[in-house]
Each structure stands twice: as structure tokens, then as C-alpha cells.
């Protein structure tokens, strides 16, 4: 299902680099992560919300949704710096600034699920 993976809507590159992610929610069925992504092709910045099924067997892939919004580079740099200081990136209960305040984004960039 490689064609389900996101590409950069600005330059079509598949070369999207994940700088960092924080787990923002954890439920009995799924985990939610916020991921800071940057395109190596055109340097566009995105904030990606990933929701992933948990509770699945070893040989089945869980359902994943991956939705991104574009982000101003200044805002992206500012918020990724905050997120790097998060003491508990995988703890949705963390109360650090990065966990408490979502980055300001511009417009929807892509939505995928697989
Ligand atoms: Zn790009
Ligand atoms: Zn945190």
C-alpha cells in the first residue's frame, strides 16, 4: 500500500522527514501522536496528527490515519524546540508547554488512512 503514504503536496516528494513526535492521547483502541514533519524536497513544514490502532495481533497491521496541516516555518521551529524539551514525549498526560498548546497551523495538507 505504498501509494497510501503521504507525499508533500507542494513538491510531490516522498522524502518527508519526521523531526519528532509526541503522544498526545492514548485510549483503549488507539493512540494519537502529533508529529513534526519537514519535506527534504522543498523544506515545507507540516504538523501531522497520527491515530493508530492498538490492541491488534502480531500479523495484522492496525488501521492508521495520518492527517497533516501545513505550518509556518517560524512557528514550526518554535514549537519543535518546545517539544524537544518535553520530559515525557510518550506520555499523553504530560503537562509541558508542547503537550498543552498545539502549534498554530495554516491549512490542511493531506489526509491518508491505511
Ligand atoms: Zn516538498
Ligand atoms: Zn510533554
Image: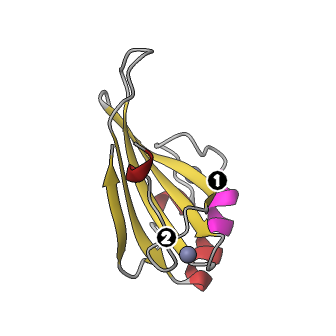
Asked if the residue at label 2 sits under 8 Å from ligand 1, the reply is: yes
Residue identified by numbered label 1: 86
- Left or right: where does residue 50 sit relative to residue 17? left
The residue that mark 2 highlights is 8
For the image, the number of numbered tags is 2
**Residue 19 vertical placement versus 60 (above, below):** below
Q: Secondary structure at mark 1?
A: loop
Circle on res. 10: none
Q: CA distance from mark 1 to mark 2?
A: 27 Å
Mark before the other along the chain sequence, 1 or 2:
2
Query: Which secondary structure lies at badge 2?
Result: loop
Q: Going 47% across and 43% down the picture, which residue do you hit?
A: 93
- Residue appearing at x 48%, y 80% in the figure: 10
Q: Quadrant of residue 68?
A: bottom left
Asked whether, in this view, residue 41 is left or right of residue 108, the answer is right
Ligand 2 within 8 angstroms of badge 1 C-beta: yes
In the displayed structure, 58 sits above or below 71; it is: above
Please state the horizontal and vertical placement of residue 78, each as a whole percent of the image. Answer: 63, 76
* 49 relative to 75 in the view: left or right: left
Where is residue 36 drawn, in percent x and y?
Answer: 56, 62
The magenta region covers 80-86
Magenta-drawn stretch, dominant element (helix, strand or loop): helix
Quarter of the C terminus within the rendering: top left
Amino acid at each position: 500500500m505504498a501509494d497510501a503514504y503521504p507525499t508533500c503536496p507542494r513538491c510531490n516528494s516522498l522524502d518527508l522527514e519526521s523531526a519528532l513526535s509526541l503522544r498526545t492521547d492514548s485510549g483503549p483502541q488507539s493512540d494519537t501522536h502529533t508529529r513534526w514533519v519537514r519535506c527534504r524536497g522543498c523544506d515545507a513544514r507540516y504538523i501531522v496528527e497520527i491515530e493508530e490502532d492498538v490492541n491488534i495481533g502480531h500479523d495484522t497491521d492496525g488501521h492508521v490515519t495520518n492527517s497533516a496541516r501545513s505550518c509556518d516555518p517560524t512557528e514550526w521551529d518554535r514549537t519543535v524546540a518546545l517539544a524537544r524539551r518535553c520530559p515525557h514525549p510518550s506520555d499523553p498526560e504530560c503537562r509541558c508547554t508542547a503537550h498543552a498548546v498545539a502549534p498554530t497551523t495554516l491549512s490542511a495538507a493531506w489526509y491518508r488512512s491505511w
